[in-house]
Image (cartoon, grey):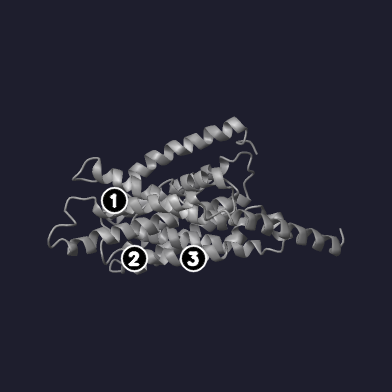
Amino acid sequence: MTNTLRQDIAYTSRNIVVDSARTRRRSVWTPAFGLAILITLVLLGLSLTTGEFDVFGEGNFWMFSITRIPRTVALVLAGASMAMCGVIMQLLTQNRFVEPTTTGTTEWAGLGLILTMWLFPTASLFARMSVATLMAFIGTMVFFLFLRRVSLKSSLIVPIIGIMLGAVVSSFTTYLALMTDTLQSLGIWFQGSFTGVISGRYELMWIVLIVTFLVFLVADQFTVAGLGKDMAVNVGLNYALVLFMGTAMVAVATGVTATVVGTLPFLGLVVPNIVALFRGDDLRSNLPWVCLVGICTVTVCDLIGRVIIAPFEIPVAMVLGLVGGMVFIGLLLRQRRKGGLAA
């Protein structure tokens, strides 16, 4: 194949991808999206007013400002960021069943937290977050290296590999926690609850807002990378750089969320699949929807956990795990009916 022919193919492929993305992008701001924004605002309003003390009572504004507002902000940032992580990983792996909790990323972040507690007991929250982010990045890269060396005969192999790696890392983390008497701290971190999110502890969550903004800037590159390495290279995309950027963004969002909130299982799996069912795979036009649906999902699960046995709370991770597990099984059955579990 001559160089001229290769250039023509690359130019044509690039135009097809860009034109397709632009066509879908114009349909983002629709009445349905406006309704989704309204529903999200209503849910956030309920989050601000749901609890044991009356936010409208005299002298309660101080408590409202240090508990309810930080908690609701954390719900928004955690829901949007972890849903965004799921869609990035699904594009990079070309697999619908991956997200940070099915690739071992959160387990590696937990290992980073335990190592920090063990080696630097007086480390600040920012230092713990930094180590958790670094370990999450290393773990995600290890996951991608495993994928390159495994024959993928089924789409289920990818999450199985991730879950197995995560189980191994989690076992080692639990062993370290037992040896260093930090098992209770490990359990608190990974119960996935917003109970302890108060003023002074949630501010690190603003970092994921920066990550979300960066994802918007490079969304088209992630979309092209989701077409496969060969296609991405043909249209002139630096696939290795995009893979590195995606891994770094997922690691930062996962590390911050794990440090402040804990694990939010299946969120990155459920939300992108729901959005992709009716919008396709163009990340730039889907990202606002992914963020909104992620915020709504986390907020609804948190509200359920706060009212079902009030005045006590059920960790949001438990509710998310139940809902996400059912959706995961539904996706498997749907793929099986379509014959999509075979490579």
**What residue did someone put label 3 on?**
213
Residue 179 tag number:
none
Amino acid type, mark 2: Leu
Q: Is residue 311 left or right of residue 171?
A: left
Q: Is residue 110 visible?
A: no
The quarter holding residue 54 reads bottom left
Residue at x 35%, y 50% (from the top left corner): 299
Which SS class for mark 3?
Answer: helix
Foreground residue among 92 and 206: 206
Pointer 2 or 1: first along the chain: 1
Residue at x 49%, y 65% (from the top left corner): 213
Across and down, in percent, residue 26 comes to: 59, 57
Across and down, in percent, residue 27 comes to: 57, 53
Which is closer to the viewer, label 2 or label 3?
Answer: 3
**What residue did someone put label 1 on?**
46
Foreground residue among 90 and 62: 62
Q: Is residue 240 visible?
A: yes
The quarter holding residue 144 reads bottom right
The quarter holding residue 134 reads bottom left
**What residue did someone put label 2 on?**
119
Instruction: Name the outermost residue toward the left.
Output: 58
Foreground residue among 263 and 330: 330
Pointer 1 or 3: first along the chain: 1
Which is closer to the viewer, label 1 or label 3?
Answer: 1
Amino acid type, mark 1: Leu
